[in-house]
Amino acid sequence: MRFSTAVVSLACAFGVVAAFPFNGFVADPATITECGDETDLLKIHNYTLTPNPPQRGQNLTIEAYGNLSEDVVEGAKIHLIVKLGLIKLLTKELDFCTESATIHKNCPLVAGEQSLYHSVELPKEIPPGKYLVNIKVINPDDKQVTCLIARAQFGVKKKKKGPRKDKNGR
Ligand SMILES: *[C@@H]1O[C@H](CO)[C@@H](O)[C@H](O)[C@H]1NC(C)=O
Ligand SMILES: *[C@@H]1O[C@H](CO)[C@@H](O)[C@H](O)[C@H]1NC(C)=O
Ligand SMILES: *[C@@H]1O[C@H](CO)[C@@H](O)[C@H](O)[C@H]1NC(C)=O
């Protein structure tokens, strides 16, 4: 499933940054927000997604900076959930060090300032809709490295607030 590959490769970036899938023709910009608390080991300073909104069949580049207060070590896990609307498409537990190696970040990921610059080619065939990706990274001592929520929207079905038009276009 190329779609999850894209998600995973981004998820691993940084030791931590996020996953994004997808996008479409009309869409709101994609966002990444932290959903953990003060005790999370990673603090994200900032990030940029290019292009934003992301486009199907194009490269999505993420650039992110953060600060890690403790090493992320061998045995750390990534908990990944991907939803399309209310539907859970994927729930997966991955080995952090295995995944991070695929983007040339080796374990342990040493505490200190972190930067990430990574591109992933988005599949052409991403179904339209609102995607939510929740990524948690947990060290073997159960300390949470980060909790991130990435949101992106693809294609066609842009929802606007306000009344819907009826069949006659009113
Ligand atoms: C993001 O944070 C890094 C490191 O703190 C800083 O060097 C960079 O200027 C920041 N970029 C933006 C766009 O704020
Ligand atoms: C995405 O980036 C790769 C590597 O830089 C490049 O080979 C590829 O042509 C790019 N794809 C698109 C659709 O721009
Ligand atoms: C990064 O975190 C370390 C340890 O928590 C701290 O000493 C340092 O000042 C932080 N750096 C930045 C730029 O926030």
Image (cartoon, rainbow, N blue to C red):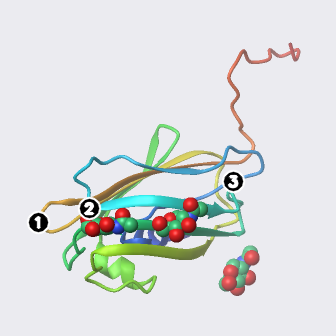
Residue 4 visible, this orientation: no
Q: Are marks 1 and 2 in contact (CB under 8 Å)?
A: no
Front residue of 58 and 44: 44
Q: Earlier in the sequence, mark 3 or mark 2?
A: 2
User: Pointer 1: residues within 10 angstroms few (<14), some, or many (20+)?
Assistant: few
What residue does disc 3 label?
53
Front residue of 41 and 23: 41
Horizontal and vertical percent position of residue 14: 41, 72
Residue type at mark 1: give it.
Asp
State the residue at coordinates (60%, 50%). Answer: 30
Q: Tell me the distance, in whole angstroms, between the alpha carbons under discs 3 and 2.
A: 29 Å
What residue does disc 1 label?
141
Asked which quadrant contains residue 15, the reply is: bottom left
Asked which quadrant contains residue 119, the reply is: bottom right
What residue does disc 2 label?
41
Mark 1 or 2: the one toward you: 2
